[in-house]
Image (cartoon, rainbow, N blue to C red):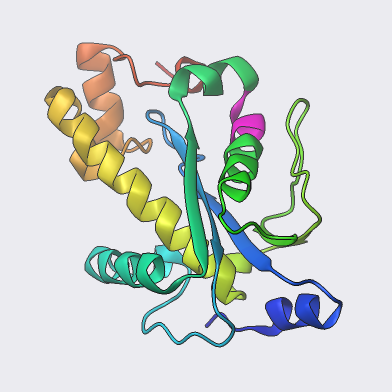
Amino acid sequence: MPGWEYERAASAAGRLSVCGCDEAGVGPLAGRVYAAAVILPDGLELPYLDDSKKVSEKRREAVFNQIRDQAAAWSVAWVEPKEIDEIDILNSRIKAMQMAIDGLKPGADFALVDGNRDHGSECAITLDHQLIVKGDSLSCSIAAASILAKVSRDRYMREMAALYPQYEFQRHKGYPTKRHYELLREFGPCPIHRRSFLKKL
């Protein structure tokens, strides 16, 4: 379960406001990539807070609302599929995370960032930060960001399912499942498909 070790170490080093940052939707063939940044009150207890992949959809929705109600600050940002094709997914992921960090009010002076990459060829995390591999399983702030990013993206993909019902986005959320490939071969890509991800078609 995630804890407060990294947040408290940053505070002990003189950081006044520490946020966690994570993204959702790097792997799908369709849709935006989302990122979130969250500043939590120290020691805040949120039942079921964990890496979003380990929490059921129903519980994610409940924790999503608790985080938004109880966080000191939170922000969600995204990069559109067309831009993902233009600048690549790594740059898009980094850009979305920096946009989420920039959207915090009040702002953070330090970020705990999930993963092992903080820059691409064009975009970088510019706030002072620490990269944490599997951070969404280790840091409460990053786990909270992972929930906000995941739920926000899933809600968006349900909206896209209503716009483009033939692709069944509500089922696979745009990820490269067997069924998604079958529907792509039948109907071809739609405006939210990432063309750069469709090499197998």
Image position of 125 (left or right of 36):
right
Quarter location, residue 39: bottom right
Q: Is residue 102 above or below residue 105?
A: above
In the rendered view, would you say 188 is above or below 171?
A: above
Q: Is residue 112 above or below residue 82?
A: below
Q: Residue furthest right?
A: 13
Residue 35 in the magenta stretch? The answer is no
Tell me: residue 64, above or below residue 164.
below
Q: Is residue 89 magenta?
A: yes
Report which quarter residue 110 is drawn in. bottom right
Which percent across, then down, holds residue 62? 26, 70
Q: Residue at x 42, y 63 (%)?
A: 53
Residue 49 percent location from the top left of the image: 42, 77
Q: Main secondary structure of the magenta part?
A: helix
Residue 119 in percent (x, y) is at 77, 39
Residue at 54%, 24% in the rendered image: 84
Residue 87 visible in this rendered orientation of the protein: yes
Q: Nearer the viewer, residue 57 or 5?
A: 5
- Please give the name of the residue rendered at 20% of the width and 41% of the height, measured from the top-left corner: 170
**Residue 146: x percent and y percent?**
48, 60
Q: Residue at x 59, y 83 (%)?
A: 42
Indicate the quadrant where residue 37 lies. Answer: bottom right
Magenta stretch bounds: 88-92
Q: Does 4 sit left or right of 152 as displayed?
A: right
Position of 56 compared to 141: left or right? left
